[in-house]
């Protein structure tokens, strides 16, 4: 969830009340994909986040896989409210 919050620049489940969030989580539903994460490399990042949110811990990627995956990205010209990333 932290990765989602950082990249989308908004809280997970943004705009939803606590009861709705509780209902979604209790039914194993992840947050909706933010509009600002719909293009380019965000597809890869979103796929990894979905894997991390998987119900079965054995199916989730390990930390080595995550750090290797994130290692191919770097921040370019970051500024508040709109982070730019590029892929090596």
Image (cartoon, helix red, strand yellow):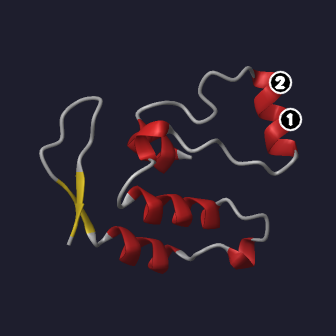
Image coordinates of residue 25 in percent, x first then y, are 79, 43
Sort mark 1 into few (<14), some (14-19) or many (20+) by Cα contacts within 10 Å. Answer: few
Inter-mark Cα distance, 2 to 1? 6 Å
Image coordinates of residue 65 in percent, x first then y, are 47, 79
58 left or right, relative to 40: right
Q: Which mark is residue 23?
A: 1
Q: Which residue is mark 2?
A: 19
66 left or right, relative to 74: right
Tag 2–tag 1 contact (CB < 8 Å): yes
Q: Residue at x 72, y 64 (%)?
A: 54
Residue 83 against residue 17 in the figure, above or below: below
Sort mark 2 into few (<14), some (14-19) or many (20+) by Cα contacts within 10 Å. Answer: few
Q: Residue at x 58, y 75 (%)?
A: 61
Residue 54 against residue 20 in the figure, above or below: below
* Helix, strand or loop status at disc 1: helix
Q: Residue at x 65, y 42 (%)?
A: 31
Number of callouts in the render?
2
86 left or right, relative to 64: left
Q: Residue at x 39, y 74 (%)?
A: 69
* Helix, strand or loop status at disc 2: helix
Image coordinates of residue 85 in percent, x first then y, are 25, 54
Q: Which residue is at the front of the view, 43 or 20? A: 43
Image coordinates of residue 9 in percent, x first then y, are 40, 33
């Amino acid at each position: 969830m932290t990765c989602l919050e950082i990249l989308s620049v908004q809280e997970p489940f943004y705009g939803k009340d606590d009861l709705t969030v509780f209902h979604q989580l209790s039914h194993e539903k992840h947050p909706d994909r933010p509009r600002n994460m719909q293009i380019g490399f965000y597809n890869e990042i979103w796929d990894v986040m979905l894997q991390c949110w998987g119900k079965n811990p054995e199916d989730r990627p390990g930390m080595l896989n995550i750090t290797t995956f994130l290692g191919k990205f770097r921040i370019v010209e970051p500024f508040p409210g709109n982070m730019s990333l590029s892929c090596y």
